[in-house]
Amino acid sequence: MITLKAPKTYIREKNILDSAGPLIAEIGQNALIIGGNTALALTGKHLLPSLDDAGVHYHVHTFEGECTAAAIARCARLVRETGADCVLGIGGGRVLDLAKAAAEDGGVPVISVPTIAATCAAWSALTIIYDEEGRYAFPRPLQESPLLVLADTAVLASAPARYLKAGIADTIVKWHEAEPNATGRPDLSLSIGLSVSRLALDLLDEQAVEASQAAGSGAITPAFAETVDAVIALAGLAGSITQENPRVALAHSIHNSLTFLPATHGSLHGEKVIFGLIVQFVLAGKTLQEINELVSFLCELTLPVTLEQLGIGGDISVQAANIAEGVVIAPEARERLAFEVSVPLMKEAILAADRYGREILASRAVRVN
C-alpha cells in the first residue's frame, strides 16, 4: 500500500491573511485559534478582521509550552467545549503539531498558518510528541494533512533569519536521510520522496544563502519565496508519501537523542538535525572533501557545526557516548543501510563531526583575520 497525504490547498502569498476570511469560512464558521503570544500578536491584526468580515466566529487559545500528549488532550477538549468546527494553528512547529493532533481528536479539520519557515510542520500529516521537559517521546502519524495552509510571506519575511536557516537545514537533511534507504530497488514512495527532496536540495543549493540574507528584513525576494516553498511544501510532500517498508531517518534519530540533553534545548529542531547529518556523513564513509563541503556550506549559513554551538560542554567524550547510546533505530530499518551503525561507531562519528566542525570554524576565523 502507498499513501500520499497533502493539504487540499497550499497558498504562499504576501498578505494572504488579510483576505483569508472567505477561505476559512468555506471550512468552518466557528474556529478555535491556537497560537503562541508572539504569533497571535503578529497575525491577529491581519487575520481577525478578515474572519469578522467573513462571519467566522472564533475562540482564541494562547499556548506556550511543549507539544505533549496532555496538551493535545486539553486542546481537543477545548474543541468540543467551544463547539468549534475547525482549528487554526498559528505559529511554529510545536503549535502547528499541537493544533493538528487536537483537531483530529476533536473530529474537525485544521488550517495551518506558519509564522516561521523552520520545518514542514505546516504541511505534514504528523505530530511529534515531546514530554514536559522538551525531550522527544514519539511520532504520531495523523489521518490527514491540514486542509489549508496559509503561508503569508509578509509574516514569514519578518521572522528572525535564524528560523529560516533552521528550516533550510531540516530540508537539506531530507534527501540525505532518504538516499541511504535506497539500497537495491527502492519502492515507489521512496523514489518519489527522493525526487521531491532532490528538487528541494537543488533549489537550496542555489537559493539558500541569498534567501537567508533577506530573511528577517521583511524583503520578499524570489529566493526567499522559493525557499519557503522548499521548506514547507517540498519537504512536506517528500515526507508525506509512505509505504510499508521501514526506513531510517538517521539525522533525526540523532536529533531525538540530543533532546535528552538539557543544554540543547536552546537549539532549534533544524540546528540539531543538521549536526546529525554531519555525523551521518562520517558514518557513511563520505570523503573528507564531501564532509568539508557540507560543513563549509553550513558555516556560510551560520548554522551549528559543533557540539559547543549546540550548547554542549564538559567532557565531550562522555557527552558523545550519552548521545550515541540514546540513538534508537529499529533493527528492521537498520538492515536497509549500506553502512554499519553501532553505539561505539556512533560515538566516534559524533566526536569526528565535532572535530571537523571546529577545524573548519578555526580555518574560517584565520582567513577573516
Image: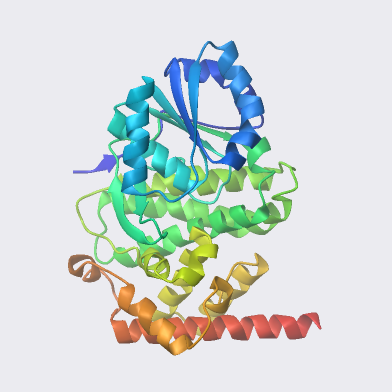
- The residue that appears at 67% across and 48% down in the rendered structure is 223
Q: Quadrant of residue 83?
A: top left
Residue in front for this viewpoint, 220 or 176:
220
Q: Is residue 9 above or below residue 287?
A: above
Where residue 90 sits: x, y (%)? Answer: 52, 36
Instruction: Please say which color scheme the image uses.
Output: rainbow
Residue in front for this viewpoint, 133 or 126:
133
- The residue that appears at 39% across and 63% down in the rendered structure is 252
Q: Is residue 175 above or below residue 277?
A: above
Residue in front for this viewpoint, 336 or 116:
116
Q: Quadrant of residue 47?
A: top right
Residue 345 visible in the picture: yes
Q: Is residue 39 above or below residue 337?
A: above
Q: Is residue 105 left or right of residue 288?
A: left
Count the marks: how many?
Answer: 0
Where residue 338 sits: x, y (%)? Answer: 29, 74
Q: Is residue 152 left or right of residue 125?
A: right
Where residue 306 sits: x, y (%)? Answer: 55, 77
Q: Quadrant of residue 32?
A: top left
Where residue 336 sits: x, y (%)? Answer: 24, 68
Quarter the C terminus occupies: bottom right
- The residue that appears at 37% across and 43% down in the rendered structure is 71
Q: Is residue 190 left or right of residue 335?
A: right
Quarter the N terminus occupies: top left
Q: Is residue 4 left or right of residue 335?
A: right
Residue 120 visible in the picture: no
- The residue that appears at 35% across and 79% down in the rendered structure is 324
